[in-house]
Amino acid sequence: MGILNATPDSFADGGLHFSYPDAVNHGLQLIAEGADIIDVGGESTRPGAERVTPFEEERRVVNVISKLADVGKPISIDTMRASTARAAVIAGATIINDVSGGLADEAMLDTAAELQVPYIAMHWRGHSKEMNNLANYENVVEEVLEELSLRISAALAAGISKTNLIIDPGLGFAKEAADNWAIIEKIERFVGLGYPVLVGASRKRFLGGDDPSARETATVELTKKLSQSGIWAVRVHGVATNKAVL
C-alpha cells in the first residue's frame, strides 16, 4: 500500500504532494513503482496534528481519487469521517482506511456497511493532540488485541461483512517505541484473529533518527521481517524499495 498524503503537515512528506497535480503525479509514480493499493489521505494524523474541516479534507482528496481511479488500481481513502469516506467511494475509492476504527465518527461503521467496501479498522485511543498521553499499558499486546477485538465486534454488528474487514494494530498511535516493538514481535497474535492485517510502520519515529527519510532502510528491513509473518499488506512511503525486498 503506497502512501499518498495530500496534506501540508504529514510527518514524513507534508507539503510535497499537497497540490492536485503533485498528488496525482505522486500517485502515478507509486503505481509505476509497483504499489498494489494507493492510500489517499487529506488529514494528517501525526502526533499533535490539528484536525481539518470536513470540507477541506474532501477538497484535498476527492478529485485526486477520481483521477487515479481511472488507472485501475485499488484506491483506499484514509479518513476518520463517514462523510469523507462516502464522497471518496463515490469518486472511485474501493477501500476505507479508518485509523480510529469507527471511534471518531459514530456514523462510520454504518456507512462502511452500507457502501459494502473493505474497511480497515485500526487500534486507536484518541486524536493526534492527545494520543501521546494515552500510551499507558500493563501488557500492550494483550490490551491492543482486546481493544481491537471490540472494534471488530462493533464493525460486524454494524453490518460490515467478515470478508470486508481488515485490521491494523496501529503502530505509533498512542504507543511508545517499546510498545511498537512488542506488537511487531507478536504480530502473529494479530494475524491469528482471522482477519487480514495491515501494518503501517513506514519511517515512523520508533525506527530511530530525527529525519524520517533516513528511516527508509529500517522500514525496508522491517518489511522483510513482517513478510514472513502472514500479514496482508504494509503501508509504506517508499514503494520501490519495499517492493524490491518483497
Image (cartoon, helix red, strand yellow):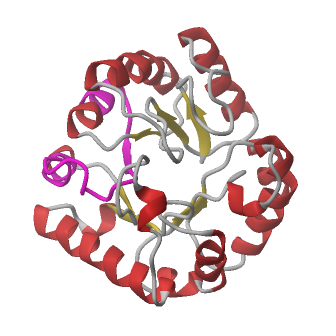
Vertical placement of 26 versus 112: above or below? above
Q: Indicate the position of residue 152 as horizontal and vertical percent values.
A: 27, 72
Q: Indicate the position of residue 1 as horizontal and vertical percent values.
A: 59, 48
Q: Quadrant of residue 120?
A: bottom left
Q: Indicate the position of residue 84 as horizontal and vertical percent values.
A: 28, 31
Segment tinted magenta in the rendering: 87-113
In the figure, is residue 57 to the left or right of 245?
A: left
Q: Any magenta on residue 165?
A: no
Q: Any magenta on residue 99?
A: yes
Quarter of the figure that contains the C terminus: bottom right
The residue lying at 59 percent from left, 60 percent from top is: 233
The residue lying at 50 percent from left, 69 percent from top is: 197
The residue lying at 60 percent from left, 52 percent from top is: 235
The residue lying at 36 percent from left, 27 percent from top is: 52
Q: Indicate the position of residue 141 as horizontal and vertical percent values.
A: 50, 85
Seen as rendered, the residue at the extreme front is: 133
Vertical placement of 187 versus 35: above or below? below
Vertical placement of 15 versus 155: above or below? above
Q: In front here: 186 or 205?
A: 205
Q: In front here: 160 or 210?
A: 210
Q: Quadrant of residue 163?
A: bottom left
Residue 165 seen anywhere in this rendered image of the structure: yes
Vertical placement of 140 versus 10: above or below? below
In the figure, is residue 111 to the left or right of 194?
A: left
Residue 194 seen anywhere in this rendered image of the structure: no
